[in-house]
Amino acid sequence: MSIGFTVTATDGAARAGVLRTAHGDVDTPVFMPVGTAGTVKAMTADSVRAAGARIVLGNTYHLMLRPGAERIARLGGLHRFMDWPGPILTDSGGFQVMSLSKLRKIDRDGVTFQSHIDGSSHRLTPARSIEIQHLLDSTITMALDECTPFPATPDQARESMALSMRWAALSKEAFVTRPGYGLFGIVQGGVYPDLRAESAAALGGIGFDGYAVGGLAVGEGQDMMFSVLDSTVPRLPTESPRYLMGVGTPDDLVGAVTRGIDMFDCVMPTRAGRTARAYTSRGVFNVRNARFADDGGPIDPDCACPACTRHSAAYLHHLFKAEEMLGPMLLTWHNVFYYQSLMAGLRVAIQAGRLGGHAAALRAGWMATGEDAG
Amino acid sequence: MSIGFTVTATDGAARAGVLRTAHGDVDTPVFMPVGTAGTVKAMTADSVRAAGARIVLGNTYHLMLRPGAERIARLGGLHRFMDWPGPILTDSGGFQVMSLSKLRKIDRDGVTFQSHIDGSSHRLTPARSIEIQHLLDSTITMALDECTPFPATPDQARESMALSMRWAALSKEAFVTRPGYGLFGIVQGGVYPDLRAESAAALGGIGFDGYAVGGLAVGEGQDMMFSVLDSTVPRLPTESPRYLMGVGTPDDLVGAVTRGIDMFDCVMPTRAGRTARAYTSRGVFNVRNARFADDGGPIDPDCACPACTRHSAAYLHHLFKAEEMLGPMLLTWHNVFYYQSLMAGLRVAIQAGRLGGHAAALRAGWMATGEDAG
C-alpha cells in the first residue's frame, strides 16, 4: 500500500488521526512548516524537530531551478540533503511557476516559463512534475494543477478546473507507487460550489491517497474560504487525509480543522519570524514595538520554546533593532513552535470531544492583548 | 580574590592553564568568540556552548549605544540578557570608538564621540568604561586604552602609550573588586620593543588580574606581530593570563600560543561564516566555489560539528547560492567549532609536551588543499 491514514477520533466535522508514511507517522491535524529551498528558513533541521514539526514541505519550483532535482537525487534525495529523515510533502511547482517565474506560457499539456533566478527556460508538465518529486524522494507528491486566480468568472474557473483535472489524471499515470509514498490530488473550482463538487468527484474517480483543497487564501477572505470548505469538505473521501494548501493564520487553522481539514502548510509563521511578528497565545504583535524595550518577561508566558523560556521580550526587541540574525532565528523558532503547539492542542481537544470550547478559549486569548487578530 | 589562574603545563614558552572565574572555569589557551551586540552572530547561546566555547566577548561600545548599559543592568546583566551563564570578557569600548564612531575627539581624560547608529553624542572615560562594564556584569573587564594606529612614529606611539597607561591607572581606581571578577590591563607601544617594555612595566606596577597585548593585527603583518610578542611576552607576569586582542587566523593562534599567549578573540570565524569562508583542517576555502556543487562529502572530514556530520559541502554551497540564512548559521557554527577544536588540540599538545610537532602537522594540513593559508 501507499501511505496509510486512520481517523482516531472525531468531534463534529473535525477529525484527529494518524498518517503513516515510509518516513514515519504523523499525528493529524498537522501543520507543515515550509522548507522552500531545502531549508525551513532560519532554522536548523534539529530546531524544526525540536519545535514539534514531524513533516515539512518542499517547493518543487525552487528546487528544480536550484540546485536541480537530478543533483538532489545524485546526492541521496531531499531528506538526506536537508537532514530531515521525516516525511516531506512537495508541491507540484505549478503555484510558484505562476506567481514567481517570468514569461510563463500555459498550454494544454503544461507550462513553459523562465526562471526568476537566471532567466533560463524550463517546462513543467504533469509527468515532469511527478518525475521531479520522485527524484527529490518526496514522501507525499502533489499532482500538477493550475491554481485558479481570484477573482475568476465561472467560465474561467471552470476552464481552469478542467485543465487541473486533466493534469491530475496525467499526474496519476506518471506517479510511481511505492510503499509509504503517496500522491494527492487537488480540488480546484474557485469560489463556486458546483465546480468544487465536480472537481472533487473527478479526483475521487481517478483515486488519490489524499485530497487537497487548492486555490484558497488567494484573496477571497476567511468567510468565503470557510464557505468553500463547508461545501467542499463533505464531498471528499472520509477515509483519506484532507489538506488545505497555503493556509494560514492560527484562526484560519482552527476554523478549517473544525470543518474537517487534516493538513496545512503556510509560510506565515516563518516569514513573520523574519519580520519581527510574533504569533502568541495573546495574539499577534511586532517585537520591534518600543513597549518591549524594557520588558523582562517572555514574548509569550504560555510558551515553552527557547525564545520564551530563555530570553526576554527586551532581548528579542534588541536583536531586531540591531538587525542581528539571532532575532529572526529565535522568533521563527517561536512561531513554528507556537503553530505546532496550537495543532497539538487541537488534536487533544478533538480526542476529548471539546474542540468548540477549546477554540473559543484560543480566540479569547488572541483578542486579549494582541495588536491584531493576525 | 578576583579571578584565579593556574598554569598546569608548559612546553617551551607555551602554557596550558585554567582560568577560574565567578562564572566558571576556562581551560587555556582559549579562543573567545565575539558576541558584539549581545549575540555571537548567527548562533544561539546553546550552539556556542555546543561548539565548545566557554567564554565569549562582548563589546562595550555597541552595548552602551544599544540597548544601553543601564538597561542591560535593569534586565539582570549581560549573562542573563544573552543566556550565557559562563564567563564574559568585555572590551573597554576604546577600539570601536576610534574605528566606528563619527566625529570622535580624544583628550587627556577620555574621548567624546557621536554614535554611528543615530549620531547621538557620548563620552567615554576610564571611569565610565569601567562603570559600563560593571553594569553589564562583565566577568573580565578591560581597562580603557587607545589602540595605537599602524603605522605610527616612535613619538606618536610613545604619546599614545603614555595616555593608555594613564587611563590604565584610572581604570584600576574605578574598578570594583568582586570575587571571581577581574580587570585586565593592555600593553601598547606599537612595534617598538622599548615602548612595549615600558608599557608592560607600567601595568605591572599598577597591578592587574591579567595582561593583554593590544594594538596588534592592525596591519603590521604576522612577522612583525610575532616579533613584538617575542619581545613583549617575557616582560609580562608569568603567573597571570596573557591575552592577545583581536587575533586571528588559525596560524596566528598557533604562533602566538607557541609564544606564551593564553587568550584570544577575533571576529574572523564568525565573520567568515557569514561570507561563505570555511576554516578547516585542510585550509581555508569559499563554499560558494563551483567545485562544491556536487560534493556529497563534508566541508571538513576531520570535523565533528553539525555542518560536517549532517550535511554535505553541496548543501552548504546550495544554501549560500540561494542566500538562505541557514548557510551563515551552519558555517559560523562550523568555524567556531573549528577554532574551539584547534585550541583544544593545542592544549592537549602542550600538556603532552609535543606542541612543535602538533603545530607542524596543523600547518601541513592547512597547506594540503586550501585555497589560501587564511
Image: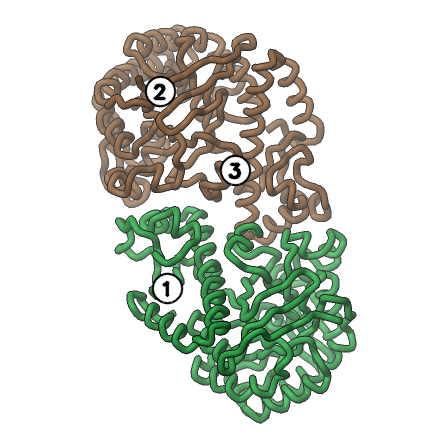
Chain colours: A brown, B green
- Residue drawn at x 66%, y 57% is B66
SS class, disc 1: loop
Q: Are marks 2 and 1 in contact (CB under 8 Å)?
A: no
Asked which secondary structure carries label 2, the reply is loop
Q: Is residue B96 left or right of residue B335?
A: right
Amino acid at dot 3? Ala
What's the distance in space between the residues labelled 3 and 2, CA to CA? 25 Å
Distance CA(mark 2)–CA(mark 1) = 44 Å
Residue at horizontal 61 percent and vertical 75 percent from the top: B241
Question: Which residue sits at x=58%, y=32%?
Answer: A338
Chain letter, disc 2 residue: A
Q: Give the position of the C terminus of chain A as an image quadrant.
A: top right
> Which residue is labeled 3 in the image?
A50
To which residue does mark 2 refer?
A3
- Can residue A282 be seen at all in this image of the molecule? yes
The local crowd at label 1, few if under 14, some if 14 to 19, many if 20 or more residues have their Cα within 10 Å, is many
Amino acid type shown at disc 2: Ile
Q: Position of residue B187 (x, y in %)?
A: 61, 82
Residue under the point 72% across and 81% down: B207
**What is the chain letter for disc 1?**
B
Residue A313 point in image, percent of width and height: 67, 44
Q: Amino acid at mark 1?
A: Ser
Instruction: Locate residue A286, reporting x and y percent.
Output: 62, 39
Inter-mark Cα distance, 1 to 3:
31 Å
Q: Nearer the viewer, residue A263 or A190?
A: A263
Q: Which residue is mark 1?
A: B281
Within 10 Å of disc 2 (Cα), the crowding (few <14, some 14-19, many 20+) is many
Question: First in sequence: mark 3 or mark 2?
Answer: 2
| Residue B213 quadrant | bottom right
